[in-house]
Amino acid sequence: VQLQASGGGLVQLGGSLRLSCAASGLTFSMYNMGWFRQAPGKEREFVAAISWSGGRTFYADSVKGRFTISRDNAKNTVYLQMNSLEPEDTAVYYCAADLREGGLRSMARDYHYWGQGTLVTVSS
């Protein structure tokens, strides 16, 4: 299984970025997916999750209304559209796959496969 995250970069306060995560080696359309982030010196934290069909989403309070998670099962890709970015959003962003059935999860330990991360830096 490989998850390849991309789309990170340097953006100014209030700007936008779209992250992508391309999956291979698994039946992507069967599994819930999540995005997490880790800032320097901090623990990895949940950002957003999406169900296998794309019909359900779940967000951390800190990004609700600013970030949107989506997926394209035909392209085996999950996205994270990030708007109104703030310096506090600066982190390495990771995509992850949850291979179990059931509800959307927000704990990192519940995810089975991880991408390599892509760095997002928001300057003020």
Image (spheres, grey):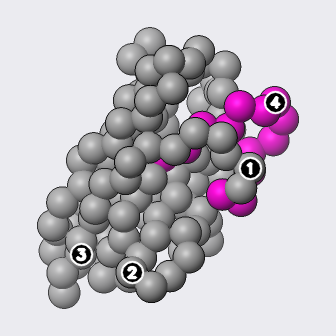
Q: Which residue is mark 3?
A: 122
Q: Which residue is mark 2?
A: 40
Q: Nearer the viewer, residue 60 or 24?
A: 24
Q: Answer left or right for 96 relative to 16.
A: right
Q: Residue at x 66, y 27 (%)?
A: 31
Q: Quadrant of the C terminus?
A: bottom left
Q: Which residue is mark 1?
A: 110
Other-residue count near label 2 (Cα within 10 Å), few / some / many at <14 / 14–19 / ≥20: few
Q: Nearer the viewer, mark 1 or mark 4?
A: 1
Other-residue count near label 1 (Cα within 10 Å), few / some / many at <14 / 14–19 / ≥20: some
Q: Residue at x 67, y 46 (%)?
A: 111
Q: Nearer the viewer, residue 118 or 59?
A: 118
Provide the secondary structure element on which disc 3 rests. Answer: strand
Q: Is residue 55 visible in this depiction of the protein?
A: no
Determine the CA span between mark 3 and mark 1.
28 Å
The circle drawn on residue 101 is: 4
Q: Amino acid at mark 2?
A: Pro
Majority secondary structure in the magenta region:
loop
